[in-house]
Amino acid sequence: ATLKRVLAAGETTSAPALGAALRTGKPSYSANEPIVVSYSGFPGKAQDWITVVEKSAPANKFGQWFYTKGKRAGSFTFRGLSPGNYEARGYFDWPSGGYEIKARSAFVVASGQATPQEPGDQPMPRGQTLKGACPWIEYISSGKPFEVAFDAVGNKFNDLRYTGDWRTDPMGTLKGGETYKVVYRNGKFTCTGFNQGTRSVGTWTYGGIDPADGLISLWGRVYTFDGLGRVWDSQYGLVGHMRTSY
């Protein structure tokens, strides 16, 4: 399919959508290295779509792209690019939504080596189960409760004070170093724990994420997990671990 649409005079092309977010797996990639883009908070239309383009490109220009096929959150792997400054962009409900950019995330493709990551920061294949490890996809899908401990944030970000805005604070209203109680039932994740915004313990429920895809959602922020229960954030890499009971 080919995306074609002429912008009407005065049409807006860059209004961000509340709650919609894009994140790349790293801020910097090496030339021709595959680029992972995660998305969350999308409306769930079959033809919401995501593309990667040069950062300076106009809103109606697109490169390789993917339809979300009705999923509110998930991730795509884009082919590698030549050195330059780029941006992942999210659009809603083609063709009705036109070229109005609803979410964006900038990144760099360097001519040398990509930004190094700490050992263990790269996720294993989604849902992979290793000998002696919990089969996490089956466990979560069964509706059994589990915990997510953000015990691997280290010095990756300073989360001692809340910025006052979930869109700019590291991991939003979730706090590094805290442990959250989670259960997946009826297609939704219910999470209980300390909320930096309210400065108290609370419980919120979000849907649109399927653990069969190797993903969990805590208050709308989407994480990748593997068969060892390790948890990755698309922006900060390895951030924690899951436990099977509380």
Image (cartoon, rainbow, N blue to C red):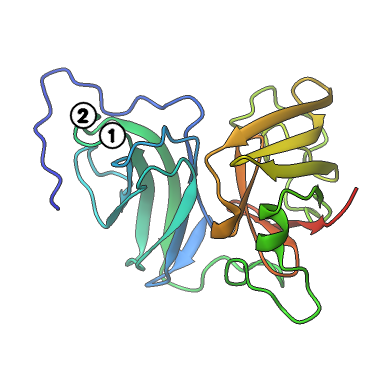
Quadrant housing residue 101: top left
Q: Is residue 234 above or below residue 72?
A: below
Q: Is residue 67 above or below residue 175?
A: below
Q: Is residue 170 above or below residue 24?
A: above
What is the spatial separation of the Cα atoms under label 1 and label 2, in whole angstroms? 6 Å
Q: Which three-letter amino acid code belongs to the residue tagged 1?
A: Asp
Q: Characterize the local packing of mark 1: few (<14), some (14-19) or many (20 or more) Cα atoms within 10 angstroms.
A: some
Determine if residue 237 is in view. Answer: no
Q: Secondary structure at mark 2?
A: loop
Which residue is rendered at x = 49% and y = 44% of the image?
73
Name the residue furthest bottom: 131
| Image coords of residue 37 (percent x, y) | 46, 54
| Image coords of residue 53 (percent x, y) | 29, 51
Dots 1, 2 in contact, CB < 8 A: yes
| Image coords of residue 38 (percent x, y) | 49, 51
Question: Does 170 sit left or right of 133 as displayed?
Answer: left
Quadrant housing residue 136: bottom right
Q: Mark 1 = which residue?
A: 93
Determine if residue 52 is in view. Answer: yes
Q: What mark, if any, has residue 96 been given in the picture?
A: 2
Which residue is rendered at x = 35% and y = 65% of the image?
83
Which residue is rendered at x = 70% and y = 27% of the image?
163
Q: Which three-letter amino acid code belongs to the residue tagged 2?
A: Ser
